[in-house]
Amino acid sequence: MLAVTLAVMATWRQFESEAAELARLIRARFEEAETHVLATLRRDGSPRVSGSEVAFQGPDLSFGSMLNAVKALDLQRDGRCAIHAHPAKGGDAKVAGVAIEVTGSEKATYTSGGEPPGGFHAFRLELEEAVFTSVEVDELVVRSWRPRQAVRTVRRK
């Protein structure tokens, strides 16, 4: 019999409360650039990468899409995704989890200047993992977090 493991997920706020320093580093990387890389799953299970912007709203890391864009359709079918912060000096940040579409009156909070022409999709990310990778002196340092677990640090020369 196949065993199924259900992933434990968290809001961005829970991540901040469980791993404040790592959350600060990752958020700073996402806020340094406007666009990032979103990875979704196509209908056939192969990966699709798309540009995306993120925002930190209330307890959530959120992002959006033009109405009926293929990345939004991917996420409606299978919410599993990862977002890689735009590469820059000082560290590499990635988060992964499940995108939950925001609809109804709650969706209005995801626009600052009104709804874009043609409509849009809004998603919030339920975090399954967050990773920050950097180089310190002569070591590659990988810090990772999963909900309800301590931050794990791996150093490689």
Image (cartoon, rainbow, N blue to C red):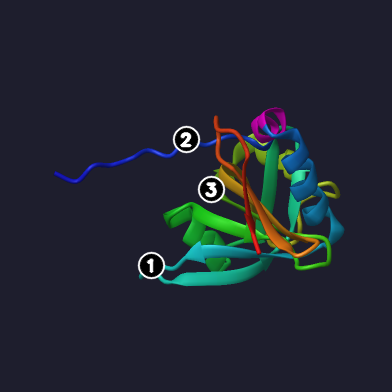
Q: Indicate the position of residue 64 as horizontal and vertical percent values.
A: 67, 55
The residue under the point 48% across, 62% down is 74
> Which mark sits nearer the N-terminus, 2 or 3?
2
Tell me if residue 90 is in the magenta stretch: no
Q: Nearer the viewer, residue 110 or 88?
A: 88
The residue under the point 47% across, 35% down is 8
Residue corresponding to mark 3: 97
Which label was assigned to residue 45? 1
Report helix, strand or loop for mark 3: strand
Q: Is residue 145 left or right of residue 16?
A: left
Residue corresponding to mark 2: 8
**Amino acid on which the number 2 mark rests in the picture:** Val
Region in magenta: 13-18
Which label was assigned to residue 18? none
Q: Indicate the position of residue 82 as horizontal and vertical percent values.
A: 57, 57
> Which mark sits nearer the N-terminus, 1 or 3?
1
The residue under the point 58% across, 67% down is 69
**Amino acid on which the number 3 mark rests in the picture:** Gly
